[in-house]
Amino acid sequence: MAVTSEPRAQEGGAAPRHRSATRSLLRLWPYVRPVRVRLFGAAGVAVVASCLGLVIPLVLKWMVDGPVAHRDPGGVWLGGALLLALGTAEAGLFGLRRWLVGRPLASVEAAMRADLYRHLQRLPVSFHDRWASGQLLSRATTDLMLLRMFLAFPLTFLVVNGVTILAGFAILLSQEWTLGLVLVIPAVPLVILCSLFETRYATVARTVQDQTGDLTTVVEEGVLGVRIVKGFGRHRSQARAFRVLSEQVRSTELHKARLLATLWALIMTLPELAIGAALVLGTMRVADGDLSAGTLVAFLSTALTLRWPVESLGFLLAMSQDAATATDRYFDVMDAEPATAADRRPAGAVRRGEDGEGSEGGQDREGGLRFEGVEFAYADAPPEEPPVLRGVDLHIRPGETMALVGATGSGKTTLTALVPRLQEITRGRITLDGRDITALPREELRALVAVAFEEPTLFSATAGENVLMGASDAGREELLRALKVAQADFVHALPEGIDTEVGEQGLSLSGGQRQRLALARAVVGSPRFLVLDDPLSALDVHTEALVEAALRQVLAATTALVVAHRPSTVLLADRVALLSEGRITAVGTHQRLLRESAEYRSLMSGQEREEGESRP
């Protein structure tokens, strides 16, 4: 298993380094809009609660210059009761703020995660080929958690603390403007420091989140491939690779912590020095009789109340940058548009009928599955590289089974992936009973075409649920019939029969058993079109013969394209198409191609050829 040291998400279109955090975070508005009333209400409640804290110093000033100075116990008790009421109200309002945002923001996170998952299902296979699974997992989990935390706390308190600081400085300047200026002056270097911090921290935050995605990928691959790791004794090398990536994440996290620590130290030091200077000057003025003791107490109490709003700017900005980076990473995926054949097909590529009109929606006279001038090239392939498929013309008549044969790398699997639009053609068109597949809704297309791949994929579900994924409306009768066709009756001997959990990737089953379940999944819905990519490669000779006998009955009632490597599989077909270097070079019966094509004979050579000629 290869482990890369650079974040693989960059291949998928990482956000540029220089971007506005505000512009990135504004992209969350469509998700926030449904809960905006409660979110704005929570911010308003928090502003009121914070401003109540600024009233407390004013009460203290009244108490010191009034009841305390005049030795009035009743006034002191009244002031104490007022302070208690203000503190209780402040605490209650902050509790109300948390209650207002808790449930709505959990729903925002759930909605974003659901949209991401839906979008991932719609993106073409080529997108998933480029992106590491760990990068996608980290976006769906860690990044969305960061966004929920940002909306719940930093977003609100950036507003609340900003209003509190402005109101507090207004109170300070109104009480004693000369001392107020002593506290206002450090604000200029703080603004400059925060601006520099934002630029540097954004780069580091993106790097660490990408590296975390790579680390997630390594963990996932190590768990899924644990049999290979153990079988080849590669646990030490895998552990070393994991340590390398872990060290990279640790190093970047420490760099991020150093940046934050430096900013926090400066943000805390400058206000403390300013408060100390104001205390010294204020004390001297009280001693000279130019300032009342109550005013000095109120001034210093207000300044101390503003310590938290000012000192919190460092980690609030850090969390905002983390959230902006998470937003960019989220929309890296959401901005990827599913490629369609209509988008990629050059002008004039659509074939025209004899009447000169495009036949996109017309009916093909012969029906069946037809490839017309089909070309395919991967989107990220170099321009000078020839297409994987070039000018493929092939017609599979209704009810006919066509075997597709070719050397390794000739494009067989790619050709089969074009039919259900797992990949989009570059030029030409594919029709099902005369209807262009690009004109069909994907749901209808997937209902018409069933696919079984050479590498079967099973899910963490029961054996029966895995099979029924091939047809949402199939019942138990169809399930049992499909199991019989695929010779997958072994499921009845499992501990809980068809309700037995097969485990992640179906690794509790043998390769042949997984392949038979995948074949049952393909045939359970009795599809009109069937695409099988070497579906019998993992079966033993005896089981293969039984599956072939049952599969003949299914193929007789459908139009099928079957990728074949063995003569026994070829003999299931009515005709054979030879694919060579991305082109269909010969079409005919098995016997005819054996006589006329040297390349076909080499593919079906030796003992395999004798077996093929001896069977009817």
Image (tube, grey):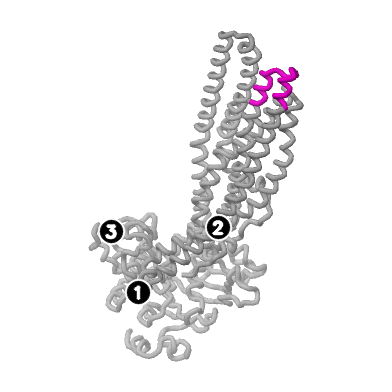
Residue linked to disc 2: 251
- Residue at the disc numbered 1: 538
Q: How many marks?
A: 3
Q: Nearer the viewer, residue 438 or 252?
A: 252
In percent of width and height, residue 116 lies at: 52, 52
Q: First in sequence: mark 1 or mark 3?
A: 3
Asked which secondary structure carries label 3, the reply is helix
Q: Secondary structure at mark 1?
A: loop
Label 2 secondary element: helix
Q: Residues within 10 Å of mark 3 (few under 14, many from 20)?
A: many
Which one is in front, 143 or 179? 179
Q: Amino acid at mark 3?
A: Ile
Q: Are marks 1 and 3 in contact (CB under 8 Å)?
A: no
Q: Is residue 143 visible?
A: yes
Whether residue 29 appears in this view of the structure is no
Q: Quadrant of residue 344?
A: bottom right
Disc 1 crowd, CA 10 A, few/some/many (<14, 14-19, 20+): some
Quadrant housing the C terminus: bottom left
- Where does residue 498 sit, x and y in percent of width and height? 28, 58
Residue drawn at x 51%, y 33% as measured from the top left: 98
The residue wearing badge 3 is 498
Tell me the residue at 59%/43% (across/down).
315
Measure how far apart labels 2 and 1 are at the Cα level: 46 Å
Q: Amino acid at mark 1?
A: Ala
- Counting residues from the start of the chain, the first of labels 2 and 1 encountered is 2
212 or 100: which is nearer to us?
212
Vertical placement of 513 versus 117: above or below? below
- Over which residues does the magenta segment extend? 281-300
